[in-house]
Image (cartoon, grey):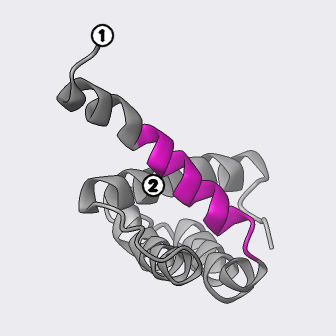
Amino acid sequence: MKNFTTFIKENWKDEAIELKLYIENDADLYRQRLVPIVKNIQNKMKSGKYDHKKAPKLWKYLVDDGAKKYAKEFPGVKFDKKIKDYVAQEFADEYKDEIEAQGGKMF
C-alpha cells in the first residue's frame, strides 16, 4: 500500500491532464485566449523574436483563466501553482511544435 504522500505526488499529473483537457475543450477559452496566444507566437516566430523560455508565462494567462472557470463550474476544486505551471509548459511545448510543423501558420 502506498502512503498518502506518494499517492499525492503521483496524482498531481492527473489533475494537470484534467485542467489541460478542460481548457482545450472550452469554446470560450479557445476563442478568447488560445487563438490570440497562438497568433502572437506565430508573429514572434516570424519576426525572429520568439523566446521559448518566456512562452510558458504567456500560456499561464490561459491556464489561470481556465482554472478559474473550472473552479466556478466545480466548486471546491483548486489547482496548485505547480500544476498550472506544468500545464502552461505543456501548452508552450505542444503549440511550438505544432506551429513549426505547419510552417509557422496555424490560424
Q: Main secondary structure of the magenta part?
A: helix
Question: Which residues make up the magenta segment?
Answer: 13-26
Q: Where, by quadrant of the figure, is residue 42 drawn?
A: bottom right
Tell me, for residue 1, which label it has, or none: 1
Q: Residues within 10 Å of mark 2 (few under 14, many from 20)?
A: many
Provide the residue designation for mark 2.
87
**Above or below 1: residue 70:** below
Helix, strand or loop under label 2? helix
Name which residue lies at 27% across and 15% down.
2
Contact (Cβ within 8 Å) of mark 1 with mark 2? no
Name which residue lies at 46% across and 49% down.
15
16 part of magenta stretch: yes
Q: Which comes sooner in the sequence, label 1 or label 2?
A: 1
Helix, strand or loop under label 1? loop
Tell me, for residue 69, which label it has, or none: none
Name which residue lies at 64% across and 84% down.
36
Q: Where, by quadrant of the figure, is residue 107 drawn?
A: bottom right
Residue 55 position in % (x across, y down): 41, 64
Q: Where, by quadrant of the figure, is residue 46 drawn?
A: bottom right
Question: Is residue 105 shown left or right of residue 23?
Answer: right
Can the viewer see residue 95 in this picture? Answer: yes
Residue 59 position in % (x across, y down): 46, 70
21 part of magenta stretch: yes
